[in-house]
Each structure stands twice: as C-alpha cells, then as structure tokens.
Image (cartoon, rainbow, N blue to C red):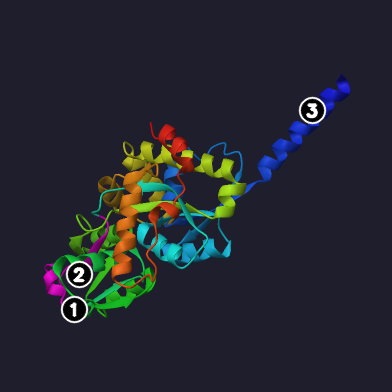
Amino acid sequence: MIRLMLAGALLLGSIELAAAQTTLRVGDQKGNARAVMEAAGQLNDVPYRIEWKEFPAAAPLLEALSAGAIETGLVGDAPFTFAAASGGPVKAIAAIRQTREGLAILVPENSPIKSFDDLRGKKIATGRGSIGHQLVLAALEKNGWAASDVQIAFLAPSDAKIAYSQGSVDAWSTWEPYVSQEEVLFKSRRIITSEGLTPGLSFQVARPEAIRDKRAELTDFIRRLTAARAWSLDNVNGYAETWGRLMNIPTAVPQNWLSRARIRITPIDDSVVVDEQATIDLYFRWGLIKQKLDAAEIVDRSFSDAIAKAGL
C-alpha cells in the first residue's frame, strides 16, 4: 500500500511538474492583453508559463505566428483575413468587440482637412492589409471613389508616425492606442471613424497545432482574458494605470482610449462569421486577396462555452 501511495505521489508530482513546464507563447500588441489581465489579477496562479512577445501591429504578429515563434495573439479582422487568404496557419478562436471610434483617419491639429471629402488627391499613411487600410477602402467605397482618388503610403506604425509628424503624408489611418496618443498628446483630429463602415471586430487567433496540443492552456488563457475584459468595463482607471506603466505612456492616453472602447470578448457565433465574411468580401472586391474565403472555415467555435461562462 505504501509503495502504491508513493508511486501515486510520484506520478502526480510528475504530472504537476510537466504542467508547470508547459509554455504558452502569446503575442501582444502594445501591452493590450497583458495589461488588462495583470490589472484584473488574472495572471495570478496561472498553471503554466506565459511567454509574452510584444508587437507594434498585427502584421508582424501574424508573421511570427506563421513562423511558429508564437502560438496565439490578438489581431484585427482585416490582417487576419490577409493572413488566412495567404494560407497562413491561423484560426480565430475568440472574437473581440468594441466601439468603432478608435479606428480613425487622423489629421494634424492645424490641417485644413475637415472631412473625408477633403482627402481627394491627398496622401494617407496606413499599414497594408491592416484595419487602417480596411477603413480607407470602406470609406472610398461608401463615397463612390476609386482607389486612385487618394494616395496610400503603406507604412508600419513607427514609420507612419514619423511621416505624419513631419508632414510627408496628409493623414494617418490607424487604430488604438495610436489614435488616442495622437489625440491626447498632439491634439490630432479624427475626421472619420469606422462607425458604420467596418465591423469593429478583432480576433484572438491561434496556430492549429496549438489548438490541438495546448487546448487546455488556450482555453484557460481565453477564460482569463474574457474575465479580465469583463472586469475592465467597470475599472477603466485601474486598467489604464497598468497599461500606462507597462508601455511608459501617460495614463491620460489609455483613459481616453479605454473609456470609449468598451472592449469585450465574445464567442464566435453566427454574427461574428457574418461580419468576418463582410471583411473578406471587401478585400476580395478591392483585389487585396485573390480568393474569396468562407469565413466559417477559418474560425474555430470550440472555445465558445468557456468564453460564455467567463463573460458572465
């Protein structure tokens, strides 16, 4: 009996040690997920190791995912579509909803540009295949303009910031927290937001291998992230303070961003699939992707129960 008890204890210890040594490699953008999870206390007592990797935008995050450097991360619907269409090993496992005020085309405080109509012939900085690019295309389409009616300068956020600050471009189509940084710190103006133009959808994505081999860790991570986002809706100041400290940016910036964003995690349901299909169709119409994907085939709904329970 004693030998059996000792063997059982050794086996349990081995299982616990193996679990403790498991690492989930998570891509984050500007401290987004890490800050809210830390502020909400959701990084306490995690039964596996989280290896955070920071990215300035979705495109390099998805490149890292494709290369196997990370296993999961947060990206917008537009770059996700771009990656899926290129055959990248990526599936959406949770949806992120928020207001659409933080995806916007910005102009400097003293710019003579007052509306989207004033952008005809002007140069707009944004990332190729990004949600900023998506906004420009949606606005062009709504106004009946052709692609040639504006000049798009495809730049990474750091380069777009330089070009925008130096006046090399007339406007910058970008997302949070860049929008709030420009508004709060430099008095930039939003001349158009994505309200009524794009779904305002983002995704937690993962490699198929991670979904297969690290399902328990992914499920737990999503549950914790969902709970943290639910907490943040009533605790903007605490989240903003943690984010500002992690990113070394004045707290007024995340307060501006988070107070209007109302970010929440939702299961991938029929409405999410419909919205993602709209993004796919937009990119297909404009020739950014060569094949028309079926949104239902690039999402994984199997994490929905965990999300629904954590969001209560």
- Mark 1 element type: helix
Residue identifier under label 2: 140
Q: Residues within 10 Å of mark 1 (few under 14, many from 20)?
A: some
- Near-viewer residue (101 or 276): 276
* Range shown magenta: 102-121
Q: Residues within 10 Å of mark 2 (few under 14, many from 20)?
A: some
Q: Residues within 10 Å of mark 3 (few under 14, many from 20)?
A: few
- Mark 2 element type: helix
Q: Residue at x 29, y 69 (%)?
A: 285
- The numbered mark, 1 or 3, whose residue comes first in the sequence reads 3
Q: CA distance from mark 1 to mark 2?
A: 8 Å
Dot 3 amino acid type: Gly
Dot 2 amino acid type: Leu
Question: Mark number for residue 149?
Answer: 1
Q: Is residue 174 visible?
A: no
CB-based contact (under 8 Å), mark 2 and mark 3? no
Residue identifier under label 3: 8
CB-based contact (under 8 Å), mark 1 and mark 2? yes
Dot 1 amino acid type: Asp
Q: Position of residue 120 (x, y in %)?
A: 15, 77
- Mark 3 element type: helix
Question: Mark number for residue 106?
Answer: none
- The numbered mark, 2 or 3, whose residue comes first in the sequence reads 3
Q: Is residue 39 left or right of residue 183?
A: right
Q: Is residue 205 visible?
A: yes
Q: Position of residue 176 (x, y in %)?
A: 32, 57
